[in-house]
Amino acid sequence: MIIGTTKELKNHEYRVGITPDNAAAFIADGHTVYVETKAGEGAGFSDEMYKEAGAVILNTPGEVFEKSDMIIKVKEPEPCEYLYLREGQILFTYLHLAPNPTLGDALIKRGVTAIAYETIVDESGNLPCLRPMSQIAGRLSIQEGAKYIEKSFGGRGILLGGVPGVERGKIVIIGGGVAGMYAAKAAVGSDAQVTLLDINLNRLAYLEDIFGASVTTLYSSEANIRKSLEKADLVIGSVLIPGGKTPKLIRKEHLKLMKKGSVIVDIAIDQGGCCESSHVTTHDNPVFIEEGVVHYCVGNMPGAVPYTSTVALCNSTFKYARLLANLGVEEAVKADKGLACGVNIYKHKCTNKNVADSLSYDFVELETLI
């Protein structure tokens, strides 16, 4: 198979879909690898490193797309890249289609086999290719929140950990999944007061066992969300429905309850965000203020730490990419049912139920198309 990776186009997105080590492994398996020039530079991987691994460097993304059977990326294609896509080509990347019908329509129209990292599941029902970015985004959410609560950025001007004689800041985390748990780890490390809400009582019990008295756990009811928001200095939104739109648990009316200068970091923004007032921002212009509340809604948070993010991501995605390269799509998804869950678009049809429901597409079982 001919495998290609291109330079990411999103604002301040420095991650890359494959590392030189990945390229070398593909080539050892008998495949060909094309890399757009400088695609890995931002993550610390030079063209020379890819050449030493046996990859071929091409000058433009168009050349890579044209020559490649499978494109491995990090983020979803930008509109200018849609024209590069072709019938039967495999696109293996984060897609986040639920809030992006334009991309979904383009993938269906062009007949791409679109496989999303974020909906692949493992034997335990977890999301192995989403997990490392959720871990990073969770940790970053506290780091970024602590910065933007500073007065110069429109925040309240408090130190989350406080000092002797001054009350510590209050952090509220809505959603106790992987991102929420790693946000809680970072929050506890900041010495702030931490409250975590989730609807899964078993998950809350597990998190309480991990964190003990360092974190207060609450059932995520409307009443508890409202009470928590009233007290919060920093709110982390880390709710996830795999492949589907995120429910709006923080509504615009809730903002009026919050302290002026408090901060919301909406980790869920890739799937539409869990705050009704959220909209995607960039690393260049990461925050906006509504009802006196600072919103941080960067859609590619892990792009801020590209070396860590790229290596962590490729550690989880490479085994699936290798399976696709060695067996082809149809045999690969038969061999790994969890990989089959990652197939969002196949033969002009939507094959993921949550994506189909979010975009009002007709859902077709993948098995009926293979």
Image (cartoon, grey):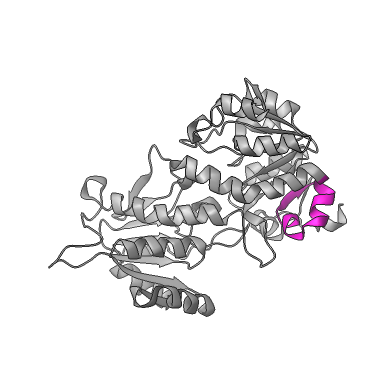
In which quarter of the view is residue 51 placed?
Answer: top right
- Determine the residue located farthest toward the top in the rendered image: 59
- Residue 139 in the image: x percent, y percent? 41, 55
In which quarter of the view is residue 167 placed?
Answer: bottom left
Horizontal arrangement in the rendering, residue 50 relative to residue 339 (left or right): left
Tell me, yes or no, if residue 221 can be seen here. no
Q: Main secondary structure of the magenta part?
A: helix
What residue is shown at x 67% (from left), y 35% (from top)? 24
Residue 42 drawn above or below residue 104: above
Residue 278 drawn above or below residue 257: above
Horizontal arrangement in the rendering, residue 309 relative to residue 348 (left or right): left
- Residue 351 in the image: x percent, y percent? 76, 54
- Residue 16 in the image: x percent, y percent? 57, 37
Q: Nearer the viewer, residue 34 or 340?
A: 34
What residue is shown at x 60% (from left), y 45% (from top)? 314
What is the count of numbered marks?
0
- Residue 78 in the image: x percent, y percent? 59, 35
What residue is shown at x 79% (from left), y 45% (from top)? 348
Q: Nearer the viewer, residue 277 or 208?
A: 208
Can residue 52 be found in the magenta stretch? no
Tell me, yes or no, if residue 66 can be seen here. yes
Quadrant location, the N terminus: top right
Residue 248 drawn above or below residue 320: below
Query: What residue span does the magenta drawing correspond to?
Result: 327-346
Horizontal arrangement in the rendering, residue 116 relative to residue 200 (left or right): right
What residue is shown at x 58% (from left), y 58% (from top)? 245
In which quarter of the view is residue 18 placed?
Answer: top right
